[in-house]
Image (cartoon, rainbow, N blue to C red):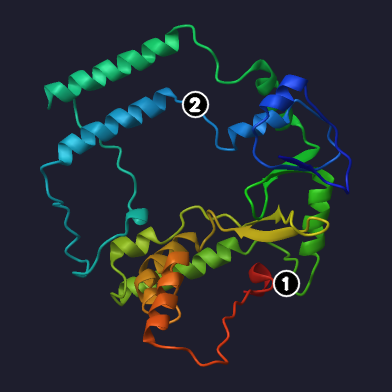
Amino acid sequence: MIRQSQKVPCIILYTEDELNDLKIIDVLHCCDYTVLRVDKTFNLGIAHCTVTVEDVYRFCRRLRLAEFFCDREDTETDNDADPPHATLPDFLRKPSPFTPDSGRDIALDSYIKAVTTDIMTLRQKDFSPNLTSDEKTALKDLKTNTNIIIKPADKGGAVVVMNSADYTTECTKQLSNTLYYKKLESYPTATYNNTIKRVLQEGMDKQELDMKTGHSLLQPHPTPGRFYILPKIYKEGHPGRPIISGNGCSTEIISQFVDHHMKISVKSIPSYVQDDMDFLRKVHDINNIGPLPPDTLLCTMDVSGLYTNK
């Protein structure tokens, strides 16, 4: 289904056959850009990709690692200076480049050779591209067009095409609200990182953190948070939901570490609800206790301005 914003005109052109075969995700146009047989490209999804040589290498490497460690127990031991409880969560472990050598298992070597040969041979033969010429042109046009911004909708899974000027105006409007934001004279990232480094060092000196964990929690090259918005297509005027991306910021790894260790504690809170099915189970358990008082109310709550009021 294609929905056209009533606020901004948009032209969508299709041939009769294309209209009959049209099966695309919900696309909302909030821009002045004229779309010519472009919308069908969105059917591929934002994460559409193809298999590469690197994919084949990673697949073969996983096979060799599985064979190498299949009969081995984890013999990794922590440094003697670390406390006995010192264990690194998986997300703190740095990826190892180790790849077992060939020659350990003849059957595995033969399989990897056959798979690699077949895939590489297929790549050398003539094949039909998975994108039509129109789709290739459309993708290139969308990528190079600086007059539009393409974002996923805040809810519903739709793809929203906006004017860059409208997107910038909405961002500027929200950031100009001095109740939630203030303009800084300089980036405080270095100051924050130095503070974090000092606190982590104090924790390691007091043996509250083992050396391995303490050093892993420090972001080596921190960057400031990045502000962006996701359009709320279900509201009039399509206002944006403000989000601060913390990827690469000073506290990103620490936040993951805290979240990792809080998961067990959070589940012990009486008000904790994991998902819809967990909620239904809790309601079922309450009903099994006996009839509820006549004045019992089933209520829901929502947070207004979650990102700006937290």
Crowding around mark 1 (Cα neighbors within 10 Å: few <14, some 14 to 19, many 20+) is few
Secondary element under disc 2, as helix, strand or loop, is loop
As drawn, the residue found furthest toward the top would be 126
The residue wearing badge 1 is 180
Taking depth in this image into account, of 60 and 179 the one nearest to the observer is 60
Q: Report which quarter residue 203 is drawn in.
A: bottom left
> Residue 214 got which mark?
none
Q: Is residue 183 above or below residue 10?
A: below
Q: Is residue 70 left or right of residue 269?
A: left
Q: Is residue 11 above or below residue 210?
A: above
Q: Going 38% across and 65% down the picture, which residue do you hit?
A: 260
Q: Quadrant of the N terminus?
A: top right
Q: Residue 275, can we see it? A: no
Q: Going 28% across and 35% down the picture, which residue do you hit?
A: 62
Q: Going 59% across and 32% down the picture, which residue do you hit?
A: 44
Which of the marked residues, 2 or 1, is nearer the chain's N terminus?
2
Residue 135 placement (x, y as % from top left): 66, 23
Residue 307 placement (x, y as % from top left): 64, 68
In this rendering, which labeled residue sits more in front, label 2 or label 1? 2
Q: Going 70% across and 55% down the picture, which residue do you hit?
A: 229
Q: Is residue 230 above or below residue 278?
A: above
The residue wearing badge 2 is 50
Crowding around mark 2 (Cα neighbors within 10 Å: few <14, some 14 to 19, many 20+) is few
Residue 112 placement (x, y as % from top left): 25, 22
Q: Quadrant of the C terminus?
A: bottom right
Taking depth in this image into account, of 310 and 239 the one nearest to the observer is 239
Secondary element under disc 1, as helix, strand or loop, is loop
Q: Amino acid at mark 2?
A: Thr
Q: Amino acid at mark 1?
A: Tyr
